Image: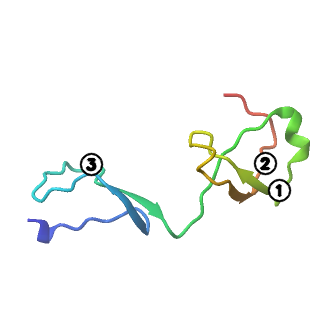
Amino acid sequence: VLRRTTIKAPAAGIVVSSTYNSKGSVIAPGEKIMEILPTASGLVVDAKLRPKDIDQVRVGQPAKLRLSALNARLTPELSATVTQISADRLID
């Protein structure tokens, strides 16, 4: 049956994890079977900052990102560029 089945990814990329590793596994329709790291586009980060700091940020300005959920000693900073700034203050 698998010979007649086509599995398509939503984007081109590298498989970073697979949910099913055993031959003959049954997969339900629409179920996630792999995680893919896209290779065609960069990451987009939606960041928050304090209202008092907004006058220090400009579109095109270089930025450094620190991923606070990861070990700061082992995880390098990521280089980024500010591409957009909200015209108004947003509240969660």
Q: Which residue is mark 3?
A: 31
Residue 33's place in the image compared with 13, above or below, is above
Task: State if disc 3 and disc 2 touch (CB < 8 Å).
Answer: no
Name the residue beneath numbered marker 2: 85
User: The residue tagged with tag 3: helix, strand or loop?
Assistant: loop
Snapshot quadrant of residue 82 = bottom right
Percent x, y of residue 59: 82, 56
Give the distance between the C-alpha atoms of the residues marked 2 and 1, in whole angstroms. Answer: 7 Å
Of residues 70 and 31, the one drawn nearer to the viewer in this rendering: 70
Give coordinates of residue 52: x percent, y percent: 88, 33
In percent of the image, x 59 and y 50: which residue is there? 74
User: Where does the image place residue 48, in percent across and percent down from the top left?
Assistant: 72, 39
- C-alpha distance separating marks 2 and 3: 36 Å
> Disc 2, disc 1: CB below 8 Å?
yes
Q: Give, as a three-letter code, the residue at label 1.
A: Val
Q: How is the image coloured?
A: rainbow
Name the amino acid type tagged 2.
Answer: Ile
Instruction: Give neighbour class at mark 1: few <14, some 14-19, many 20+ (Cα, 10 Å).
Output: few
